[in-house]
């Protein structure tokens, strides 16, 4: 039952919260929102969650798409570009965490498709909750979730929280 | 319908953490589990405070009732054999099982069924409505018990109408910080498909949505 699981979690340590981030504003907003509401300094160090920040790095082959004649040459450039992007993402996430004075955080960069990476991370860490941002496309697509958050909402084995960035009112 | 007002103090401690949490309660096991999960995980940081919600924000439980009349606007004999309404039986037969859940199609069919609705005697409608109210009351009592056992005070709201839209509208009205919905945890085949209310809320709510899935051991 749920209470047994929770008792076990509290004996072992805190329950784990996985936050998926990528290069978009929306995911950083999701991270900030989570830190603000779940890890406020007022709670002291006794927040009930351990935070794991997971960034998915897409594989170069998936980014290149069609393999043209010059694909092999482009590969190393794409690879280094992706690595730079993911490092930048993690750096920014670290900044956000320290600005909210949250120290007990793990950062992970996993290569692969974001959907699978996040669901596997949930399984690996036995997370209680997965937090993802939502791309929140324009007015026409507003009713459609980004495909990663939608996939995670359906397939993750834990509670999923989808954080949306509020639209500025015109 | 119970309502208990929780005073939200603006001083000290959890100022940033104060959230307005709206929990959707339906008649499924999944949503009661969602409620207890939310209580456990969102309101645990101040364990020594006797009334946790005082420093941590508001918890509002919302239950949406479906209007009983819609159930009776549906499939009636005399209407289908009526020669003047030959086109409508097609609508009835193909969408029979979905019709009474969709508010939109009801307006199309309701003209042809107005006659039929009157046929359904008022006593039947009354007893259905009473049964429904009884169900809602039982459900809310169970929800209050769960809240009380975790030492959390909650407000209750009952709204009429289509659950998905009502919940999203109410979340927007009260400027909720977080909307919590359960998921029906359907069987393995359909595990990939969320329940329709939680899916709709995930897509249309303007605030962050928390979808609580039932624990793994409970798949039929």
Image (cartoon, coloured by chain):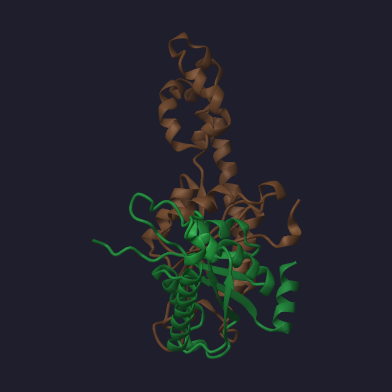
User: Residue B120's x, y, as percent?
Assistant: 53, 25
Kindly give the residue lying farthest to the top in the view shown.
Answer: B83
User: Residue A50's x, y, as percent?
Assistant: 60, 81
Residue A42 shown left or right of residue A116 in the figure: left
Q: Is residue B30 above or below residue A77?
A: above
Kindly give the residue lying farthest to the left in the view shown.
Answer: A170
Residue B60 shown left or right of residue A139 in the figure: right
Between B109 and B55, the residue placed more toward the observer is: B109
Residue B142 visible at all: no
Which residue is at a point 46% across and 83% down the rendered structure image?
A91
Between A77 and A48, the residue placed more toward the observer is: A77
User: Residue A122's x, y, as percent?
Assistant: 64, 69
Q: Is residue A118 above or below residue B77?
A: below
Q: Is residue A28 above or below residue B97?
A: below
Which residue is at a point 45% across and 31% down the rendered structure image?
B106
Between B3 and B189, the residue placed more toward the observer is: B189
Between A154 and B144, the residue placed more toward the observer is: A154
User: Residue B22's x, y, as percent?
Assistant: 48, 63
Which residue is at a point 41% across and 72% down the rendered structure image?
A29
Colour in which the image shows chain B: brown
What count of labels does the image hold?
Answer: 0
Residue B205 visible at all: yes
Chain letter, colour green in render: A
Q: Is residue A33 above or below residue B142?
A: below
Q: In terms of image quadrants, where is residue A107?
A: bottom right
């Amino acid at each position: 039952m749920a209470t047994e699981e929770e008792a076990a979690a509290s004996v072992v340590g805190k329950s784990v919260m996985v936050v998926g981030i990528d290069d978009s504003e929306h995911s950083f907003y999701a991270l900030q929102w989570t830190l603000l509401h779940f890890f406020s300094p007022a709670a002291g160090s006794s927040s009930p969650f351990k935070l794991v920040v997971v960034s998915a790095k897409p594989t170069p082959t998936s980014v290149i798409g069609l393999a043209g004649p010059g694909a092999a040459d482009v590969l190393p450039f794409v690879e280094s570009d992706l690595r730079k992007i993911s490092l930048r993402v993690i750096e920014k996430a670290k900044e956000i965490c320290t600005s909210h004075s949250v120290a007990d955080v793990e950062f992970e960069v996993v290569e692969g498709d974001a959907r699978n990476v996040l669901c596997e991370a949930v399984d690996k860490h036995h997370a209680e909750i997965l937090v993802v941002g939502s791309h929140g496309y324009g007015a026409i697509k507003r009713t459609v979730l980004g495909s990663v958050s939608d996939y995670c909402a359906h397939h993750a084995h834990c509670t999923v929280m989808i954080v949306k960035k509020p639209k500025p009112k015109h | 319908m119970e309502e208990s007002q929780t005073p939200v103090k603006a001083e000290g401690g959890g100022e940033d953490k104060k959230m307005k949490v709206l929990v959707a309660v339906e008649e499924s096991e999944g949503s009661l589990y969602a409620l207890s999960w939310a209580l456990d995980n969102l309101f645990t940081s101040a364990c020594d405070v006797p009334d946790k919600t005082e420093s941590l924000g508001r918890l509002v439980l919302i239950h949406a009732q479906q209007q009983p009349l819609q159930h009776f606007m549906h499939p009636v004999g005399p209407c289908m054999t009526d020669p003047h309404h030959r086109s409508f039986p097609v609508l009835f037969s193909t969408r029979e099982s979905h019709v009474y859940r969709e508010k939109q199609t009801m307006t199309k069919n309701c003209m042809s069924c107005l006659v039929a609705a009157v046929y359904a005697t008022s006593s039947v409608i009354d007893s259905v409505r009473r049964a429904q109210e009884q169900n809602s009351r039982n459900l809310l009592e169970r929800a209050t018990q769960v809240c009380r056992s975790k030492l959390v005070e909650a407000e209750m709201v009952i709204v009429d109408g289509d659950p998905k839209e009502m919940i999203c509208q109410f979340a927007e009205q009260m400027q909720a910080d977080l909307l919590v919905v359960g998921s029906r945890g359907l069987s393995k085949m359909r595990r990939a498909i969320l329940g329709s209310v939680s899916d709709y809320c995930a897509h249309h709510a303007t605030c962050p949505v928390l979808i609580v899935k039932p624990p793994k051991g409970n798949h039929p």
